[in-house]
Image: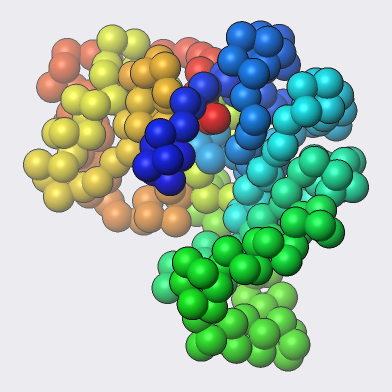
Amino acid sequence: MLCCAHRANIVGVPYTPSGPDIGQFAEALNAHRPRLYITNSALHNPTGAILSPVVAHRLLKLAEQADLTIIEDDIFADFETVPAPRLAAFDGLNRVVHTGSFSKTLSASVRCGFIAAPRDWIDGLADLKIATSFGGGRLSAELVLTTLRDGSYRKHTEALRARLSRAMSETIPRLAAVGITPWLQPSAGMFLWCRLPEGIDAADIARHALAEGIVLAPGNAFSLGQSANDFLRFNVAQCGDERIFRVLEKAIKSQGVGTSRHAGCGDTRRS
């Protein structure tokens, strides 16, 4: 939304299970000469994919050739059980700005995060923060500091990862029972990027569900090229409600489609 407000020209790059499609990433650099690339390296939203070291090195090489700045949005990092490669680590914060937040792990109301950036950027970023928000949320900052100091944050995230893992293992077979198949099974996190049975439009399913009081996330909400009309993103943390699966089964059957299909591949895009 911020990019749109500043009238930025947003270009999508297709995502694969190991990161952005490097061939199309290179084509986008040549065709559009972008100045900024925004991405999730680990637990990509919405797919749950993780950047591979090979793709990371190729991406950074292309970024260097194009003099491209990268924003690595790492807000889901603490959901990981095994840390994935990070562009910032490979790059040494040369052209990568690494950002994180505690709003996903603690509470959406805890508007507190961090930025790791090239040293000569920090003073300017601090001035911008003060100019735009008159500082920050003192209560949120003190809460985060306390939980980090006394060890309660570590215990909390360990328990949270275990709960999400159970929710993931319970949600996948329940979706499969109505013909909805994950594009990949994430190693951690809360999102499942799933393909619907053939011939089903995610927007139609989402509208049907909304009429029943269930909010779903259709694929094209995440696809700049509007090429993910047969995908839905599920948050497994919110899939304990029995109504979700009843509504999905009813919506799919109402379109005259059975519940058996094979897994496919995804085409989500993130600028």
Q: Residue at x 75, y 87 (%)?
A: 149
- Give 212 or 243, whichever is nearer the viewer: 212
Would residue 232 be found to the left or right of residue 14 on screen?
Answer: left
| 256 to 210, vertically: above or below | above
Percent across and percent down for residue 270 are: 53, 30
- Give 223 or 181, whichever is nearer the viewer: 223
Q: Quadrant of residue 205?
A: top left
Q: Residue at x 69, y 27 (%)?
A: 19
| 214 to 38, vertically: above or below | below
Would residue 258 be found to the left or right of residue 162 on screen?
Answer: left
Percent across and percent down for residue 93 are: 84, 49
Q: Residue at x 67, y 85 (%)?
A: 145
Would residue 56 be found to the left or right of residue 206 on screen?
Answer: right
Which quadrant of the figure contains the N terminus?
top left
| 124 to 12, vertically: above or below | below
Q: Quadrant of residue 220?
A: top left
Q: Residue at x 50, y 53 (%)?
A: 167
Q: Is residue 166 visible?
A: no
Q: Is residue 220 visible?
A: yes
- Give 34 or 62, whichever is nearer the viewer: 34
